[in-house]
Amino acid sequence: MANLDSNPNENHTAQYAVLDAGSDSMVKSFLRLEGIAGAALSAVFYARTGASWWLFAALWLLPDLSMLGYLGGPRWGARIYNAIHSYVTPATLAVSALLLGSPALLPYALIWMNHIAVDRLLGYGLKYPAGFKYTHLGLLSPKRLQPIPASQPQSVGPAGPA
């Protein structure tokens, strides 16, 4: 994040440059393929655990409850959302399940990873503290929060509530 603020005496006017990861069509394609691969692998491994697909369906949207963090403002919202929507946390759960010989935890980690992978496939990335629509994958448009076409350069306004 680059500080684009020219007046350091003004409160809450920090601006963030959002790198549009989709500005290069090849990079955007790789990011989508990464999402497809993560979703497919996590689903295949989930199927191999023998866990119920009802469990998968019931828990799949659970990580999105992290959006409630935005009730505390955009900075807290981004922190909570990113902690839940990073592969680090479910990967830690999966490794712990394997190391502790507790395979019952593995389906939960795989559901979580699948959710994150599908989010990445759809263009929902980790959030900047400027607001929900500012992601590491590019700026989401206000219309139905769809990714803005890569040809448009992106920058973020004031860091206040979005």
Image (cartoon, rainbow, N blue to C red):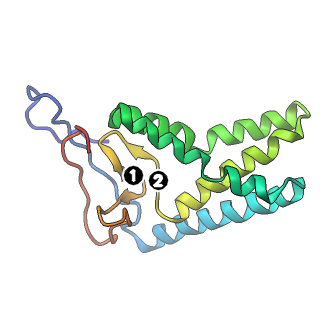
Q: Nearer the viewer, residue 14 or 145?
A: 145
The spot of residue 116 in percent (x, y) is 59, 53
Q: Which residue is drawn at the image coordinates 67% and 62% (left, top)?
A: 39
Residue type pointed to by label 2: Gly
Dot placed on the residue nearer the N-terminal end, 1 or 2: 2
Residue type pointed to by label 1: Thr
As displayed, is residue 122 above or below residue 76? below
In the picture, the disc for residue 125 is 2
Left or right of 55 on screen, residue 77: left
Which quadrant holds the N terminus? top left
Q: CB under 8 Å between callouts 1 and 2?
A: yes
Q: Which residue is drawn at the image coordinates 37% and 58% (left, top)?
A: 138
Q: Nearer the viewer, residue 122 or 153?
A: 122
Q: Quadrant of residue 145?
A: bottom left
Left or right of 159 on screen, residue 49: right
Q: Nearer the viewer, residue 44 or 71?
A: 71
Q: Which residue is mark 1?
A: 135
As measured in the structure, the alpha-carbon distance from the residue carrying label 1 to the one carrying label 2 is 5 Å
As displayed, is residue 108 above or below residue 150? above
Q: Which residue is drawn at the image coordinates 53% and 43% (left, top)?
A: 65
The spot of residue 102 in percent (x, y) is 89, 35
Q: Secondary structure at mark 1?
A: strand
The spot of residue 131 in percent (x, y) is 32, 45
Which quadrant holds the C terminus? top left
Left or right of 142 on screen, residue 57: right
As displayed, is residue 94 above or below residue 120? above
Q: For mark 2, does the 10 Å Cα neighbourhood hold few (<14), some (14 to 19), or many (20 or more) residues?
A: many
